[in-house]
Amino acid sequence: MGLVGFIARRAAFSLLLLLIVSFLVFGLTAAAPGSQLTALLGGRPPTPEQVAALNEQYHLNDPFFQQYGRWLINAVQLDFGTSSVAGVSVTQQIGQYLPITAQLAAMALVLSLIVSVPAGLFAGIGRGGKLDRTVSLLTVGGMSSPPYAVGILLIFVLGVKLSVLPVYGAGEGGGDRFVHLILPAITLTIGLAAIVARQTRASTLTVMQQDYITFARARGLSPRRILVVYALRNSALPVVTSAGLLLISLISGAVLVEQVFSLPGLGQLIVSSVQQADLPVIQGVTMVLALVVILTNFAVELLSLLIDPRTRYAAKG
Amino acid sequence: MKPFPLRRGAMLLVVAGLTLTACAGSSDGPQKPSNTTIPEFTFSLPTLAKSMDMTSGADVATAGIPAATTQFLEAATLSGYKPVLAEKTSTPDPTTIVYDLRPEVKFSDGSDLAPADVVWSFKHAQRAKASNASLIKSVESVTETGPMQVTVKLSKPDPSARFNIADTSVPIMQATFGEAHPDDLGTPDAVPIGTGPYVATSVTPSKISMTRNPHYWGTKPAPDKLNFVVIGDDTKAQLAVRSGEVQGTRVSDLRTFDQWKKITGATTYAAPQMMMDFYGFDTRKAPFDDVHFRRAVAYSIDRKGLVQAGFGGQASLLQSLAPLETVRGSAPSAEEADTFLDSLPQYDLDPAKAKAELAQSKYATYDGEVKIQFVAEIPWSKLVALNLQENLKALGIRSSVETYTYSDWLDAFYSGEMKTPTPMFFTTTPDAGSISYPIDPSSGYNFSHFASERTDAALGDLTSDKSWDAAKTILTELADQVPYVPLFQEKTVFVLSKGYVYTQKVTALDFQTGAYLDYLRPAK
């Protein structure tokens, strides 16, 4: 019951957080410089009929809380209104752009974990050795490389000079999509994999100094069994926590990488909507991203409960 | 000492080689056009069209996309009009435009173009939410006056009406399809049916693909398939052109012009835009209510230097508060227009003249602070503001620089209460009509609140047979009283990769009306 109660409390807290975020998102965009009417009108002097029609369509003259209430009720039903620039439903737009960001983030996450967890693990086990020094050097390099510069360099070398990978766009789906996402995923991965590798290394170092590892060795267990069953599982908790943060970082990092590779993902959508003061889209995308972050954190907490029995006992009180 | 590893040395050589290759390169000589077709052509732009219905979010930067599928009655050019769907246009009086439609024009679904489609298209373009409705507000009625004839009546003489109809304001679409899609016309699910040379086969956020319209009535452009893709900025677009994935683009930041010129085999095409950049003063407010103070400020802007810094050299200096094409379009002859422009005072950087003007001003010892505005999204405006701030120091005038966001600027613009001096940028038309905008209180553009007896009297004559005299009076008065400092006329630059040529320079108007596709050819 204690565990269920804990999960219910966390779920309720997540909902409350989402509500606060929704108010902040709506309030801040409403308070942002430049009126929505101006954005809707574009660069031309309006006719009075245009102004009246737009005020009526977007309820621009209603009081703030009335506007927020209407927006919130619709948002709960996944209706974020209509884009003031494209004139189509924001939900439809998000549906078009979200898959690219999700695919890119998933690809980069898998790539990051495949590269960084073994690298950090082996570096931690062989502390001070050649591999450890190499991994440390590469992680410093990876963390110091700005994604924008890495992206441009990759485009130039692999796309322009060697012509082995496409330089822009998301492809037409399937295999073509996969090929188009390779360079952006590598760009996203480089910095983040470095962080996870260091996190894994530090965690492994701590675990390898524990008594149960010494006893396991004394019992004559194979190095492989010690590595997988003892070291990996016990160093997994901080790695899972950082992988959750990694997913969030991947989504925010995608904003920049999508710009570099001209990918039509949520990052590009939010940048263009900010540039064009397309408030319904800004609000809708921000809410979706907030939802992803909150759900990811919630999932990480549940995973922690699953992986580490100590957290379950703590949750039960 | 350890020997330098050979493999590492080889890798460095490769990197150095790649770097050198990146920095080198130059444009080849002019390529000659061939009359064969192009199997597939990809054009990149910083954004795609907001809607395939140009009346819903018309944008000069992306209008070339819907213009490939939807056409106009006429195509506006820098020097006049080219017939498109109307084979003949006449203006029997200043408030009437008669369009005789081309027979046997078909829409892409095979149906015939009829006057009813034109009438519906006008109504659609005039609806309250249409983005360019304000440009055709003088259109009072549109009626079928013959089997293939449509007559447009204006509520008052409007010299710019024909141009605006021919530009992007009234695209001709099939009425039946438009009526069936009152709310979603222009979205990917309801791409308008037009008469243009192409039909959209796929519209996504990142790519719009088109194939030939099998019912196209005119001469077919060279590409069999046409793609428009999004590439956010010039650096990445250059890489895409270098890689061969993109064959054509429009330069979005003119400061990168020299970089484009260095792409091997690529050709650049620069042509003037019907647009002017200038700075303006609120003439009701001190110290800008004094003409000598305004002139002193005007003489403190290094216009020539800023053409290179702000536009990579791809702009010309405005000689008056109207582009050259507007003045020539208003004058009886190009020679007369040029002679007139040469007679106007020019405000180039001249500290001595600035000091002399300031000395004559009632604010000769001005102890206030001039707050120079610029718009964050308009790079040239920041350069002008900083340049002006520096040069005003020499006059002993304290100044500071303030940033507007573009939407703040629009808010201030619509409210009619702009802080000054502030940057301004207008698109114009090649006729006397647009000369009135910056001083006509009813235009919505006279934010300087400048008025004089001479300009007031001349405004009414702009639509009469005395229009050239009226234009001269207004432009002379504006040059003398300087409520605005004319600065630049930007160019539009298109780039084609190796293997492709334009048969002539392509202007922004050609892009907006779709003519840029007609000039495209594969190189021999």
Image: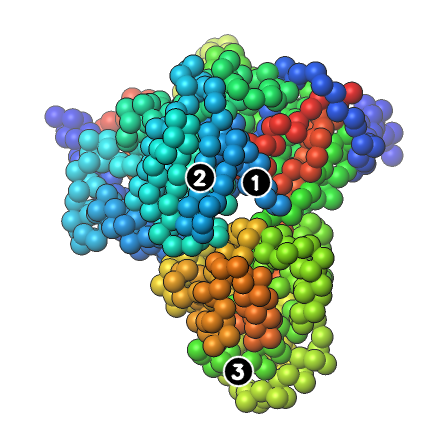
Q: Residue under label 1, please give it.
A: B81
Do the numbered discs 1 and 2 sit on residues whose CB atoms are within 8 Å?
A: no
Chain ID, mark 2: B
Q: Residue under label 2, please give it.
A: B98
Q: Quadrant of residue B345?
A: bottom right
SS for callout 1: strand
Picture residue at 34% right of the left edge, 28% below the top: B116
The quarter of the image holding the N terminus of chain B is: top right
Using the rendered image, report if marks 3 and 1 lie on a common chain.
yes
SS for callout 3: loop
Picture residue at 35% right of the left edge, 33% below the top: B144
Picture residue at 40% right of the left edge, 66% below the top: B441
Residue B249, percent across and down? 62, 33
Above or below, B369 relative to A254: below
Residue B217, percent across and down? 53, 19
Q: If you read the primary sequence from the N terminus, does the residue marked by circle 1 or circle 2 appear first?
A: 1
Callout 1: 10 Å neighbours few (<14), some, many (20+)?
some
